[in-house]
Image: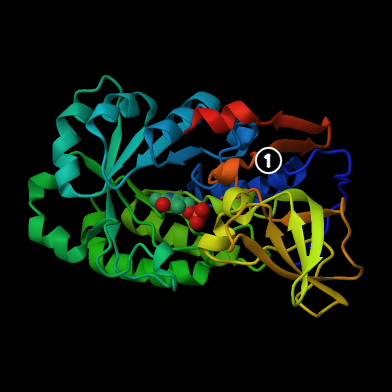
C-alpha cells in the first residue's frame, strides 16, 4: 500500500480530519458488490465511523446501520433511514422504549436480557426482529482488548451457557443469531470461525431467519479474499435458508481519511523531537490504545530517511507521542504532516483532554471540493465537563 493523495491540504485550518468521498465510494462499491452477489445485507457499524453527513451516500449502497447504544441507533434512524440494528451487552430500562422506536433488529446478549424485554418487544406496534448474540469461543484475535472470546468474556452466550439454560420455549420469538469474533481479519479467519459456529450452534441455526456475522471483516483491504467471503455467505445462506448480515465498521471507511496537522515546534533531547498541533490521546486515541503506528505521507520508519523525529503533542501527558518517523528533510515550524487512515475510530473516540480543541471535520468530494462540515471551539469543551 502506497500512502499518497492528490489532495492539496494547504488551504485547510489544522488540525482537521479530511474524508475523501471518492475513496469512500470505492469502498462502498466493493461492499455493495458483496451484497449483490450473495443477497447478504451489509450494515455500517457506526461505532467505527459516524460522520453522518455521509450517511445518505452510504445508504445508497448499504442496507442500514448497526448500533451499540440508543444514541447511535437514533443517529442511524434519523440520518440514514434504512435498517437499524442494535446490540448491547445489556440495555438500560429507561432507554428501551426509545430504542424500540428506532430499531428493526434487537440483539440480546443473554437469555436473561431476552426474557426481561421480550413482552415489551412483542407488544410494540412495529415488528421488531429479535436475536441472540452467541459466543463461539473461537477467535484469532491476539489482543484481549479486541477479543470478544477471551476467557471470562461478557460478550454473548457460550455454548455451555446456552445448553445450561436452554428450553424449547426460550427460542420462541428469536429469529436470528449474531456473533462477532473478528478484528481486521481476512475471510480465511471467517471460514474457520464459521466451522466452529456451525459445529456448536448449527442445530439452532436451522430455526433462524437470519444469521449476523458481526464485524471485523477487512473486506476493502487490498489483499482481502472476497471470493472466499462469497463462498462463506452462500454456504450459510443455503444450508440454513437464512438471510445473512455483515456489519463491518472499519471496512466501510478504511483508508478514506486523513488527519492533517501542523508542526508547532522542533527541539532536541537525545534525538530530534517535533511538537504537533494534534494529539494521540485526544485525536487518535487508538494509536495509544491498540496501540499502532499510523502512516504519514512521505515519511518512513526511523532511520529509513536522513532525519528521524519523535512526534509528540502539545498536551502535558508525557506519553502523548505518536511515534518515530524519518523524513527527507529537517522538519520546520509551520510544516504540515498528513496522517493516513484517520476516518475510522478517530472522530468517534476523540476528546478534549487538556482543553485541546477538536479537529475540524472536512469532506472532500469531486463535485463540491472541500466542505468543513464541523468545527469546534470553547463551548464544545465547556459543555461536556
Ligand atoms: C465493533 C463491532 C463491529 C464493527 O467492527 P469493525 O472491526 O469495525 O468491523 C460490528 N459488530 C459488533 C457487535 C461490534 O462490536
To which quarter of the image does residue 153 belong?
bottom left
Viewed as shown, does residue 66 lie left or right of 307?
left
Is residue 14 shown above or below 372? below
Identify which residue, 242 or 304, lies in the foreground.
304
Point 90% across, 70% down: residue: 328
Is residue 66 shown above or below 302? above
Point 65% across, 39% down: residue: 357
Q: Where residue 216 sits in the image (x, y, percent)?
A: 49, 59
Crowding near the residue tagged with mark 1, few <14, some 14–19, many ≥20 C-alpha atoms within 10 Å: many
Point 83% across, 30% down: residue: 368
Local SS, label 1: loop
To which quarter of the image does residue 93 belong?
top left
- Whether residue 128 is visible here, answered yes or no, is yes
Viewed as shown, does residue 100 lie left or right of 314?
left
Is residue 254 shown above or below 322? above
Quadrant showing the N terminus = bottom right
Residue sticking out furthest to the right: 329
What residue does disc 1 label? 359
Queried on whether the Cβ of the residue with tag 1 lies below 8 angstroms from ligand 1, the answer reads no
Point 76% across, 43% down: residue: 22
Amino acid at each position: 500500500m502506497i500512502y499518497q493523495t492528490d489532495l492539496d491540504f494547504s488551504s485547510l485550518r489544522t488540525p482537521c480530519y479530511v474524508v475523501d468521498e471518492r475513496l469512500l465510494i470505492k469502498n462502498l462499491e466493493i461492499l455493495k458488490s458483496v451484497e449483490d452477489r450473495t443477497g447478504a445485507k451489509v450494515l455500517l457499524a457506526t461505532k467505527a465511523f459516524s460522520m453522518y453527513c455521509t450517511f445518505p451516500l452510504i445508504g445508497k449502497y448499504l442496507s442500514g446501520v448497526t448500533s451499540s447504544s440508543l444514541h447511535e441507533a437514533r443517529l442511524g434512524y434519523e440520518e440514514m433511514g434504512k435498517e437499524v440494528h442494535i446490540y448491547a451487552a445489556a440495555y438500560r430500562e429507561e432507554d428501551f422504549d426509545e430504542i424500540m422506536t428506532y430499531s428493526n433488529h434487537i440483539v440480546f446478549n443473554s437469555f436473561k436480557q431476552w426474557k426481561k424485554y421480550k413482552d415489551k418487544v412483542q407488544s410494540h406496534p412495529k415488528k421488531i426482529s429479535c436475536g441472540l448474540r452467541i459466543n463461539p469461543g473461537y477467535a484469532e484475535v491476539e489482543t484481549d482488548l479486541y477479543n470478544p472470546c477471551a476467557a471470562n468474556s461478557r460478550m454473548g452466550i457460550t455454548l455451555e451457557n446456552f445448553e445450561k439454560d436452554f428450553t424449547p420455549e426460550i427460542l420462541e420469538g428469536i429469529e436470528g443469531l449474531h456473533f462477532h469474533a473478528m478484528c481486521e481479519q481476512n475471510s480465511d479467519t471467517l471460514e474457520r470461525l464459521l466451522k466452529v459456529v456451525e459445529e456448536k450452534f448449527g442445530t439452532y441455526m436451522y430455526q433462524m431467519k437470519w444469521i449476523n456475522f458481526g464485524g471485523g471483516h477487512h473486506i476493502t483491504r487490498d489483499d482481502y479474499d472476497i471470493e472466499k467471503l462469497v463462498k462463506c455467505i452462500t454456504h450459510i445462506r443455503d444450508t440454513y435458508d437464512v438471510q445473512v448480515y455483515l456489519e463491518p465498521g472499519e471496512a466501510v471507511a478504511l483508508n478514506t481519511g486523513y488527519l492533517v496537522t501542523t508542526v508547532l515546534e522542533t527541539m532536541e533531547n537525545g534525538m530530534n523531537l517535533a511538537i504537533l498541533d494534534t494529539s494521540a490521546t485526544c485525536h487518535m486515541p487508538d494509536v495509544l490504545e491498540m496501540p499502532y503506528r499510523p502512516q504519514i505521507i512521505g515519511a518512513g520508519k526511523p532511520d529509513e530517511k536522513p532525519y528521524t523525529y519523535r512526534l509528540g503533542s502539545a498536551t502535558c501527558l508525557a506519553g502523548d507521542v505518536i511515534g518515530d518517523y524519518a523524513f527527507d528533510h529537517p522538519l520546520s515550524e509551520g510544516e504540515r504532516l498528513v496522517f493516513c487512515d484517520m476516518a475510522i475510530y478517530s472522530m468517534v473516540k476523540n476528546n478534549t483532554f487538556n482543553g485541546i480543541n477538536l479537529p475540524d471535520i472536512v469532506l472532500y468530494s469531486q463535485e463540491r471540493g472541500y466542505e468543513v462540515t464541523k468545527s469546534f471551539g470553547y463551548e464544545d469543551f465547556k459543555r461536556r465537563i
